[in-house]
Image (spheres, rainbow, N blue to C red):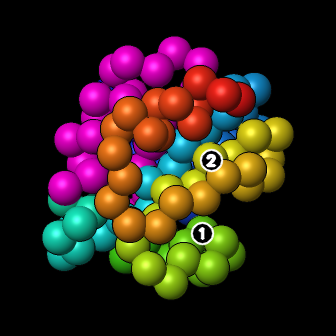
Amino acid sequence: MAMEFTDANFEAEVLKSDKPVLVDFWAPWCGPCQLMGPVIEELAGEVTNAKIGKLNVDDNADTASAYGIMSIPTLKVFKDGKVVKEFVGAQAKDKLKAELASL
């Protein structure tokens, strides 16, 4: 199951993670975000070399603002506390899985 990232746990769960982390920046009112929801859940169940989770930009504006989220869905891959990959818009599961496998 995908993790729920928040302003409160972002540093501990994402920035200080010993594994790469895929963060889906999303909002409940966003149509393309709703399409990505099942993809993120499936990835969370299939990928073992990375953490997979979501951050609701409406409820966690500080983190969304800190990472310059202007369009959603935006997916960022963090490794060692830094953004190493970024995707804007809905993405294919296979593409995301391949990107995570390359880390």
Task: State whether residue 62 is above or below residue 73.
Answer: below
Residue position for label 2: 77
Residue 76 image offset from top left, x and y in percent: 58, 55
> Would you place residue 71 above or below residue 13 in this image?
below
Q: Is residue 78 left or right of residue 75?
A: right
Q: What residue is at 73 percent from the left and 55 percent from the top?
A: 83
User: Which amino acid type is shown beneath numbered disc 2?
Assistant: Val
Q: Earlier in the sequence, mark 1 or mark 2?
A: 1
Q: What residue is rendered at 46% in x and 40% in y?
A: 96
For this view, does 42 lie left or right of residue 49?
left
Q: Is disc 2 surrounded by few (<14), some (14 to 19) or many (20+) residues within 10 Å? A: many
Closer to the camera: disc 1 or disc 2?
2
Given residues 9 and 42, the one toward you in this image is: 42
Q: For residue 63, which numbered disc appears in the image?
A: 1
- As helix, strand or loop, the secondary structure at mark 1 comes to helix
- Magenta segment: 35-56
Q: Quadrant of residue 64?
A: bottom right
Whether residue 31 sits left or right of residue 42 in the image: it is left
Instruction: Give the image location of residue 102, x and y in percent.
Output: 66, 28
Q: Quadrant of residue 40?
A: top left
Q: Is residue 57 magenta?
A: no
Q: State the residue at coordinates (23%, 73%).
A: 30
In this picture, is 50 found above or below 79? above
Q: CA distance from mark 1 to mark 2?
A: 14 Å
Q: Amino acid at mark 1?
A: Thr
Q: Is residue 65 above or below residue 55?
A: below
Say which of 76 and 66 sits in front: 76
Instruction: Confirm whether residue 66 shows in the render.
Output: yes
